[in-house]
Image (spheres, grey):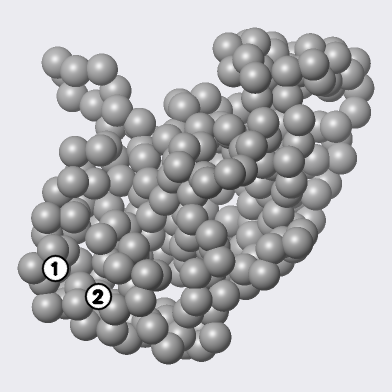
Amino acid sequence: MTKLASLIVSLLITTFGYTAHADDHAEAEMPVGVVYGLDVHDAQAFVGSMTKYWDSKTGEKNPGYAILRQVISGGESSASHTLAVVFPSYAAWDEANAINANSKDAATFGAEIQESVSLVSSSMFEFTGVTAGTGTVDAGSAITMYYQLSVSDPATYVSALKLYDAAQPSANQLGLFQIAGNGDSDITHVIAISANSIADLMGNLKKDQSGKAFESFLNTISPIRSNEGSFVTADIAVFGN
């Protein structure tokens, strides 16, 4: 089994859902997971393998879900697609690993994707619970801009973002993610900005990145954050419960 197959089988699955999961007796847990950058050689075959796994008995038991996205603009990366694998908690992640460990469905999936995809990158993330904007985005049809950030003072950055959102709320939907296990990269956070179309996303961004509130936001965060890169994706398919 290839490195990619082993990685995906061991983590099978989920996505950028901005919803926290909690009960009446515990602090809310935030979604966690991995985003894979993939060079997809045969999209139809890969989607078929994903669908087959999620429709299997193993897939039905998996506590997570996955979103496959096409990279519209990816900068220097060779990835043609991303696969977001997200769980409601680390405990759910462990549960999925146990479910897949001895599963023939997961083994079949791992064998099938060896010819259809190659791994470009992988990044572990935690959703911070920080959101902004007033937009409502439909999972499976979203267009998303990701700004990859190096933030030296997260508390100040979040405070500035909340003040900016209160003064000039975006018509897009924003979510802030903390990045871990990203190799030698300086990226500490990613802010994902989504809308239901490219026209809406870019039109709203132009409005957002102007005015006194935005200038004040930039003045506050400029000393504590650097933009390490950006890319844009379009949702293709959603898998899972």
The three-letter code of the residue at mark 1 reads: Thr
* Badge number at residue 53: 2
Task: Tell which residue pokes out farthest to the front in this image.
Answer: 184
* Mark positioned earlier in the residue sequence (2 or 1): 2
Q: Is residue 54 left or right of residue 163?
A: left
Q: Looking at the image, is 127 positioned above or below residue 154?
A: below
- State the image quarter where residue 112 is shown: bottom left
Name the residue nearer the viewer: 84 or 7. Answer: 7
- Contact (CB < 8 A) between labels 2 and 1? yes
Within 10 Å of the Cα at label 2, are there few (<14), some (14-19), or many (20+) other Cα atoms?
Answer: many
Q: Which mark is residue 222?
A: none
Indicate the position of residue 45 as horizontal and vertical percent values: 42, 88
SS for dot 2: helix
Q: Nearer the viewer, residue 78 or 143?
A: 78
The spot of residue 30 in percent (x, y) is: 35, 31
Disc 2 marks which amino acid? Tyr
Q: Quadrant of the C terminus?
A: bottom left
Distance between mark 2 and mark 1 Cα atoms: 7 Å
Q: Is residue 154 left or right of residue 225?
A: left
Q: Position of residue 135 (x, y in %)?
A: 62, 38
Mark linked to residue 58: 1
**Element carrying mark 1:** helix
Task: Identify the residue at image location x=18%, y=46%.
Answer: 94
- Residue at left 33%, top 82%? 49
Q: Quadrant of residue 217?
A: top right
Is 176 placed left or right of 75 in the picture? left
Q: Is residue 55 visible?
A: no
Residue 232 position within the rendered picture, expressed as x and y whole percent measured from the top left: 69, 56
In the image, 28: left or right of 140?
left
Residue at image location 25% in from the left, 38% down from the top: 90
**Label 1, residues with CA under 10 Å away: few <14, some 14-19, many ≥20:** some
